[in-house]
Image (cartoon, helix red, strand yellow):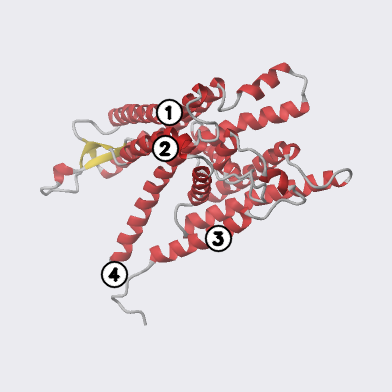
Amino acid sequence: MQNENEKEHVLKYKLAYSGIILLVYIVGKNIPLYKIDLSAYQQASVGVEDLLVQTIGGDFIRSSILALGVFPSMISALLVQVILALRGLFTKAKVSPRKSQRMTVAMTFAVAAFQAVTRLPELKFVVTGGMLPVARAVAGVEMVTGAIFIMWLSDRNGKYGISGRMVFVTVNILERIWMTLLGHPIQKLAVPLAAAALMMLVILIMENTEKRIPVQRISIHNIYGDKNYLAIKFNPVGIMPMMFATAVFMLPQLLVSLLGYLFPQQSGISWCQENLSLTKPFGIFIYIVCEYLLTIGFSLLMISPRDITEQFLKSGDSIVDLRAGRDTRRYLGRVIWRISFLSATVMGACIAAPLILQLRGDIDSTLVMLPTSMMMLMGFSCNMYREVSTLHSYDSCRPLF
């Protein structure tokens, strides 16, 4: 019989589960694709796009069975959210979680297959002749299967572990930061590390700053009645827009790569292939636009003024000096818009700064993603700290009965 004073150890179990998930992921990262030429990748140079892929859990440098990372599941989740949001404009019927999950799985399979097809011509194999198509087909199946497997691991870790898919991105970022620091002299690291320290400080401040909107709650009639508020973070949706901006930015790259493979003589496609890169001003502009739009869009989607207003109407609560209903919804919409726009501007400036320094030659191209990676790592750390603190507080409480 369980002791009535015995505490639950939810945090311990979740940490152990996430540890097992990470162990499986690390093992999978070190399993190469079928007949891949490992020696060609050991001597290959690392470009900006390779570092960009690693920020969303991909790893084409190793060319493992998990090379696609969390990109297919991330972009699929985004597309499903957009589809459901557009559907909600025309009908009030709700989509069941099971149907939404099926849509995400199907779209993940399609995106993974498309990404594998665009990557296969770039892979180098140890076989030639008639065996080369067979090796490419097997490698393509392995990459798609690996993407579905990572999606399943993310789902399991989200339910029974800590931080969902973020743990995979964190592991890849930590590995890339460590390899970058070991592979460059301190003279080259001075400027990137200084930029990284400043960007980490900025994201730390943004994650711990909030706007408090006074709320009048009818159920509280004591000295704390005038101390209730609705809190909106200065960085409303955390580091998520940066991850999704990377995924969205890769979509046109993949499409242009496929078109370039099919129509190699088209000058317009060649121009897009050359300029749709983070080493070119056009590519940097597109990347920052993606970050802006996703930050504002996610903020309005996840902190919905309509949902908050409906909750106020049901509970009888209201924002001080505002009528419940339309006035509250409009006010919250303006506040969330201003905060998200300011957040997108600050984050966009932080992302653009090292990329612009790279164009000027102040930062080496192999180091340009180091500040952004460390900024994302700080954002992930803040989210994980909050989750761990919540679970620790839960474990600290003893049941009343």
Outermost residue to the bottom = 1
Q: Above or below — where is 362 with respect to 379?
A: above
Tell me the kind of residue under disc 1: Gly
Q: Above or below — where is 124 with respect to 6?
A: above
What crowding class fits label 2: few (fewer than 14 Cα within 10 Å), some (14-19), or many (20 or more)? some
Q: Position of residue 276 (x, y in %)?
A: 60, 25
User: Mark 1 highlights which residue?
Assistant: 348
* Dot in front, 2 or 3: 2
Most foreground residue, 303 or 245 = 245
Mark 3–mark 4 contact, CB under 8 Å?
no
What crowding class fits label 1: few (fewer than 14 Cα within 10 Å), some (14-19), or many (20 or more)? some
Q: Position of residue 166 (x, y in %)?
A: 48, 48
- Secondary structure of residue under mark 3: helix
Measuring 48% from the left and 38% from the top, which residue is drawn there? 370
Q: Quadrant of residue 343?
A: top left
User: Mark 2 highlights which residue?
Assistant: 193
